[in-house]
Image (spheres, rainbow, N blue to C red):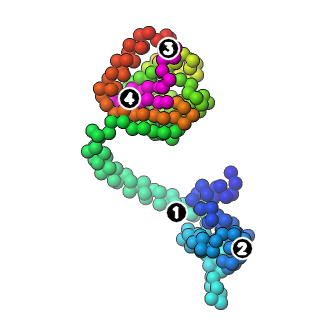
Amino acid sequence: MGVESILEEIGLTKNEIKIYLALLELGSTSTGAIIKKTRIHTSKVYDGLERLSNKGLVSHIVQANTKYFKAVSPERLIEFLHDKKKQIDQQEDEIKSIIPQLKSRQLTVADLTEAEIFQGWKGMETVYRMLRDYLGKGDMNYVIGASKGEDEEKVREFFTRHIHFLGQKEIRQKIIFNEEARGNLPVYKKYPKLFQLRYMNNITPAEINIWSDKTMIVILRRNPTIILIHDQKVSDSFREYFDKLWKFAKK
């Protein structure tokens, strides 16, 4: 990763990065030289200098009624990160303090929420983390139609991690795979007491997870879509459907 990419990762904007790097090369200088070197509009240079000053990365002096700006030593970037960490820790404490209030509001509208839709791999991470957080040792998740998905490598990587997390919490799974996915996830062999596997031909193009009062329909496109249904009757009916299929599925 290049210098500019790393600086952007830690929270500097593209203009701030250009200005800061220009100042490192120019030394103490006026805005005119910065504008000339960076080719950034005058007003944006002033804005960038102010933000960099607030971050402690730029200092200035006034000589003959002219401001001269100078980049602070790059070691200050470490202090900048420490400041950010302190701020994040403080924000984390503040969020923790209001979580009970937020949960109380959520409960008041729980009956109105019957389904949620999650998109992409970030959505996958969110909803499968919900599953793992909700279930505990010995709880069961039922899966119908586990497949390779359209992006086999990504699917294998994602579910290998997920299975390890399930194994750590000792969450059980009964899974009916599509036959074409047989052997796709050898990691299951590490947890023989937790996972029961069976197979059927072309059972469904989507994967269905049933846990507690939740039914999760996962469409494993290259950009996945996940529908999470919160309804006890729906999950009960899918669980009955699973039990019927399980009798006909092959080991």
At 38% from the left and 56% from the top, the residue drawn is 94
Amino acid beneath label 3:
Met
Question: Gap between marks 2 and 4, in whole Å?
Answer: 60 Å
Task: Report the side of 52 relative to 232 (left or right).
Answer: right
Question: Any magenta on residue 228?
Answer: no
Specify the amino acid type for callout 4.
Answer: Thr
Instruction: Identify the mark at residue 83; answer none if there is no mark.
Output: 1
Q: Residue at x 47, y 60 (%)?
A: 87
**For this rendering, which residue is in front, 242 or 183?**
242
- Read off the residue under disc 4: 215
User: Which residue is disc 2 drawn over?
Assistant: 36
Mark 1 or mark 3, which is nearer the start of the sequence?
1
Earlier in the chain: of badge 1 and badge 2, it is 2
- In percent of width and height, residue 76 lies at 61, 66
Residue type marked 1: Asp
* Circle 3 residue: 200
Q: Is residue 157 left or right of residue 95?
A: right
* Number of residues whose C-alpha sits closer than 10 Å to that of mark 3, classed few (under 14), some (14–19) or many (20 or more): many
Secondary structure type for disc 4: strand
User: In which quarter of the view is residue 134 placed?
Assistant: top left
Q: Residues within 10 Å of mark 2 (few under 14, many from 20)?
A: few
Range of the magenta residues?
200-219
Residue 18 quadrant = bottom right
Which of labels 1 and 2 is toward the front?
2
